Structures are given as C-alpha cells and as structure tokens.
Image (cartoon, grey):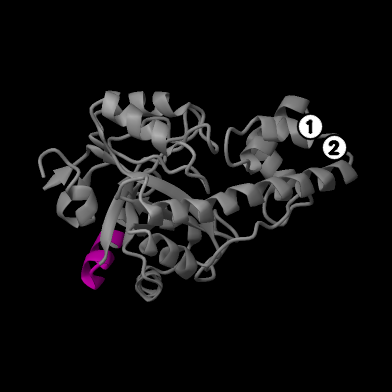
Amino acid sequence: MWSSDVDLHSHSTYSDGHHAVDEVARRMAAEGARVWSLTDHDTTRGWEEAQTAAARHGMAFLAGVELTCQPALPARQAALRQGSWHLLAYLPGPLEAPRVKAFRAWVDGMTEARGPRMEAMVERLNELGLPVQASAVIARAQGAVGRPHLAEELVAMGAVDSVQEAFDVWIGNGKPGHVEQERPTVAEAVARCTAAGGFCSLAHPSYYDVETEALMEVLLRDGVAAVEAFHGSHADAYRHELWEAATRVGLSVTVGSDHHGPDHHPRPGHRPVITRSLPDAVRSLRPSA
C-alpha cells in the first residue's frame, strides 16, 4: 500500500527555512500530512513549538534533526553536497526523557560551533574586500546559523545578485570565503541517536553521487536504519533503485519533501511512499496504523 500523508523532512527559521515553525505546521496540514517531522540543521530548538503546532493542526509529530556529518564514502564525481553527508536523526520518545536531553545537549554543541565558523568566514570575506558584518548574518538566524544566511546577507549588500552566485563565487566548498565545519562521523551520530532511543536515515542520497550498492554496505556498517529514498529531488527511477536496494538488505526507507519555503521544495507533503517500508516508529504514528 502507498501513502502520501507522511513528511519527515522540513525546515523552519531555526535553521535555513523561510517560515516559522507554526507556519510550517500549517502548510503541512493544509497539504494533507498526518505525520510530520521538523528537521532543522544541527538544532533541536523548534521541537517543543513543533509538537504543539502539530497537535493543534491534527498531525502526529516526530522529533527530528538534520545532522551535518563527514562523508562516509567519496563521491564518484562532483557531488552536490561536497564535504558532508546529512543524516536525519529521529527521536520518537518523550522530549523530556533524560537520554533525549543528553542527545539534545550534544546537538547544541554543534549549533554553537556554527557561530565561530561563521565569524571566521566573515573575517575571510572582509580580508577579500567584502565588508560583511558577522552580527548581521547571525541576526538572520533564529537558531543554527549557516552559509545560506551569509549568502542572503551578501545579496542584501549588493555584493552578489543571488544566493547561488554567493555560493558559486565566494562561500561554496573550495571558494575563497569558505571555512570547513567540524562534523561528526556518520557512525558517531548514529551511536548518539541510538543511545537516545532514536533511529537515523540518510538524507537525499542523490546529493552525494555514490554507487547504490556501496552506499547500502556503508549504511549497514554504520548502523543507519533507513535511507530517504523518497525525497523531493529524486527521480522516479532513482527512488525505485534505492527502495529496491534498501529492501534487499533489510533497511527501511523514509520520505520527505525537504520543504524550506517558496524557493526550495516549495510544496510540502505529496511524496508517495510504500507504507510497509517505513520504519516501525513512523508507521505506528499514522492514524490508520
């Protein structure tokens, strides 16, 4: 059986999303989502708001976070996500549980590390003749500050014409203003999440340009429970390839729009997925389960 009422990948203004948490929830519900996860980058600060908003809009909420990790395999060619893999960590238990609090404290360390990195990038851009202010960039973020916020500030200054140009010329991987971010390994992130009673899924594998069978071997090796086969960027053939490979090796699959707002995967929900292939913790949240 297929369903399209689960969306386990979305972002708010706590990271690089366009909308506040309640607006993300409203949009999800309006598009028919019945199980929703907020997965901001390297921060859990929106969880309580999201849980309340989900209940108000008649949805089940699954706490999540998109963790920036070291690549577990090299890309075959120039991958969209150079230098990092993104791991979706999900915590189905009570948010007040001590082990969940311990996991959140670890994630908070990643959130806080983004500030010094951003200051280093701003300093580098200043040396290159771009008078960007770190305080202005950080003010654009309610939680985890990142390169999209810096790109937006460069556009506002008139230094570039678009966010994409900012990445292509100044702050993309290997560009003059880029500074590497400290990242955990996939195995470390999985261990932290599992210790808190959660499970992990590799986000948008198409971004990393790795061979599917090799990918499955690494996910099994590192304890990743699922793969986001049904992502908003995946073509039908690639979704089927990932689902088939995951099923063959005993992994679950997850589904997500990766909704950020009007400029990136603008329509939440509406991602059909084979229901029986979802993780048990997700299927148990569906009203028909």
Q: Is residue 222 left or right of residue 94?
A: right
Q: Nearer the viewer, mark 1 or mark 2?
A: 2
Q: Quadrant of residue 233?
A: top left
Q: Quadrant of residue 149?
A: top right
| Residue 266: image location, x then y, percent | 42, 30
Quadrant in which the C terminus appears: top left
Q: Which residue is mark 2?
A: 130
Check disc 2 and give the amino acid type: Leu
| Residue 181: image location, x then y, percent | 65, 56
- Residue 134 is labelled as none
Q: Main secondary structure of the magenta part?
A: helix
Q: Which residue is mark 1?
A: 159
> Of marks 1 and 2, which one's residue comes earlier in the chain?
2
Residue at the spot 34% in from the left edge and 27% down from the top edge: 53
Distance between mark 1 and mark 2 Cα atoms:
7 Å
Magenta span covers which residues? Answer: 242-250
Q: Is residue 137 left or right of residue 261?
A: right
Q: Secondary structure at mark 1?
A: loop
Q: Is residue 38 left or right of residue 92?
A: right
Q: Secondary structure at mark 2?
A: loop
| Residue 138: image location, x then y, percent | 69, 35
- Name the residue nearer the viewer: 209 or 201: 201
User: Looking at the image, do the residues carrying marks 1 and 2 touch, with CB atoms under 8 Å apart?
Assistant: yes
Residue at the spot 70% in from the left edge and 39% down from the top edge: 166
| Residue 98: image location, x then y, percent | 39, 54
Check disc 1 and give the amino acid type: Ala
Is residue 267 inside the magenta stretch? no
Q: How many marks?
A: 2
